[in-house]
Image (cartoon, rainbow, N blue to C red):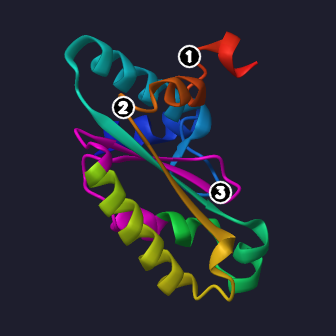
Amino acid sequence: MGATKYRLIESKDQGYVDVNTGLFSSRFFKTIIAKQVQSFERYQAFFSIVLVTISEKAVKEVGSNLKEIASFIRENVRVVDEIGSSGNGQFCILLPHTMSQGASVVADRMRANLLDKLALPNPDELDVDILSVPEELLRIRQLADLDRSCSA
């Protein structure tokens, strides 16, 4: 138990965890995406990413803090899925071994669950986007800063 706690504290100190959400930080999450891209390029291990953006106005209106929203998102994905956050209402969910059709189901369910949970007066305050390989490999590489020349 003590070793596990130490690793968690060490992770937070190194910036692996976003303090506003308790999820992986944007910086660390990019390394997770990079590994997934390498796995796809070498083994054709398909994956998708669901991007969830909740407007700052919506977060303030509903009175939810980002940790509550992050916890809700965590409860609504599989154990094998990874979640990262930039801490300002933007969440990134990596779905290993999931093609675009499966990601679409996850995204639709996530959007519906979040709209219900947050009771947003304006549904446009919540944006959900899907990136899947191989269709969106270039955008995913840009998201992870793997192609600096493309993202500059």
Circles 1, 3 touching at the beta carbon (< 8 Å): no
Give the magenta part as a residue range.
Answer: 71-100
Q: In this rendering, does residue 83 appear at all?
A: yes
Q: Residues within 10 Å of mark 2 (few under 14, many from 20)?
A: many
Of the two numbered discs 3 and 2 on the same chain, state the one appearing first in sequence: 3
Which residue occupies the foreground of this view, 124 or 54?
124
Q: Residues within 10 Å of mark 1 (few under 14, many from 20)?
A: some
Circles 1, 2 touching at the beta carbon (< 8 Å): no
- The amino acid pointed to by label 2 is Val
Say above or below: 62 vs 75: below
Of the two numbered discs 1 and 3 on the same chain, state the one appearing first in sequence: 3
Q: Residues within 10 Å of mark 3 (few under 14, many from 20)?
A: some
Residue sitting farthest toward the front: 135
Q: Nearer the viewer, mark 3 or mark 2?
A: 2
Spatial distance from mark 3 to mark 2, Cα to Cα?
Answer: 30 Å
Identified at 22% across, 38% down, the residue is 97
Q: Nearer the viewer, mark 1 or mark 2?
A: 2
- The amino acid pointed to by label 3 is Asn
In this figure, which residue is indicated by the disc labeled 3? Answer: 20
The quarter of the rendered structure image containing the C terminus is top right
In this figure, which residue is indicated by the disc labeled 1? Answer: 146
Which residue occupies the foreground of this view, 123 or 61?
123
In this figure, which residue is indicated by the disc labeled 2? Answer: 133
Identified at 54% across, 72% down, the residue is 68
Identified at 35% across, 57% down, the residue is 104
